[in-house]
Image: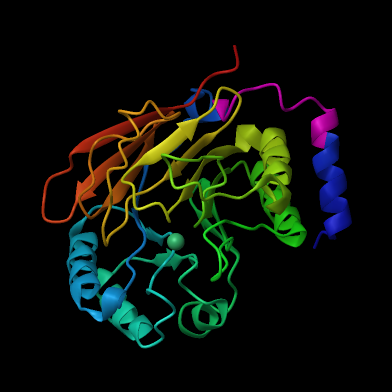
Amino acid sequence: MKTPTSTRREALSIIAGGATLAFSPAGLANSKRPLSKLRFLVVSDTHLGYKNSTSAEKRWIQAAAELKSASGDLVLHLGDIVDGGREEQYEVYLREREKIGKPVYEIPGNHDPLDLFRKHIRKQVDVAVDHEWLKFVLVSNAHTDSHDGFITDAQLQWIESQCVAAKEQQQYVMLCLHVPVHSNRHPDRGWHVKPEHGQTKLYDIIACHKQQIVAMIHGHFHNGIRGWKDDDGIHEICLPAVLYNLDRGLEKQKAAGYNPLEFRPGYTMVTIDKGLMTLDYKPLGADVSINKKCEFVHDG
Ligand SMILES: [Zn+2]
């Protein structure tokens, strides 16, 4: 078992070794080590109990039924399972979750008080889930009294240790946090991890381990597929909500990043194959309407 100190030292030696020169994550598209095709499903923001009506429950029932028959090895839920901490709704959530017949891994959102998440979903909140060559690093970064995200120093150290472990195990990392880290403001929501709340330090860690990181994914925005790929950064993507998504006119207003025009309630089918990640937006009760391709750039 590594102590946090040795983990940190190891990470620093990687920086010193110049391993940060390649763009992220070149190995994914590297024919020297072909990786098996992976497919998984992502839901977010079910908000059960929303407005004290059964509308959210109906959506979740439909989403869970579709997830059951959809092809994909596992399901991620990116937070806001219930709305406003309505404890009785976790039962509703779990009742349908059981029918999916695939492993489901959740992270808490700002509507999921941590004590309730621990009680109903999982005792250990921040966990890493290994699936073949991919390590999902699930991080709780939401507070119930804020729309912004917060990452503690202990969490940052843990995230870094997971990146180091992934490298040792020849794995790649998918970072999963409810609140996006990427800066954004009007006409976007304006909700993210502010520099002093862990953004700067997380980006430092990402810069060191970029070769290992496939993407960072989030919920929270209710904005369909809303993503950014900065020149020197990784793919950072908010994924569609099951309850509702809104068109904020981002493409029209030329906001940075991308926001394909699909805003029906839905979920995402993620396929990673031959160095390409495809996000298929699956509106509930309708066919896939958007195939967003996320490429990984080789080190030139
Ligand atoms: Zn949220």
Residue at image x 51%, y 47%? 134
For the C terminus, the image quarter is top right
Residue 237 location (% of width, % of height): 44, 42
For the N terminus, the image quarter is bottom right
Residue at image x 56%, y 56%? 148
Q: Is residue 49 visible?
A: yes
Q: Is residue 269 left or right of residue 109?
A: left
Q: Is residue 98 visible?
A: no
Can you name the residue that lies furthest to the left here?
A: 286
In the figure, residue 144 lies in which quadrant? bottom right
Q: Is residue 64 left or right of residue 36?
A: left
In the figure, residue 14 lies in which quadrant? top right
> Is residue 265 magenta-colored?
no
Of 17 and 227, the residue lying toward us: 227
Above or below: residue 286 compared with residue 232 = below
Ligand 1 is found in the corner quadrant, namely: bottom left
Q: Is residue 290 left or right of residue 221?
A: left
> The magenta stretch spans which residues?
14-26
- Magenta stretch: helix, strand or loop mostly: loop
Residue 90 location (% of width, % of height): 37, 81
Of 292 and 244, the residue lying toward us: 244
Colour convention: rainbow
> Is residue 21 magenta-colored?
yes
Residue at image x 83%, y 58%? 4
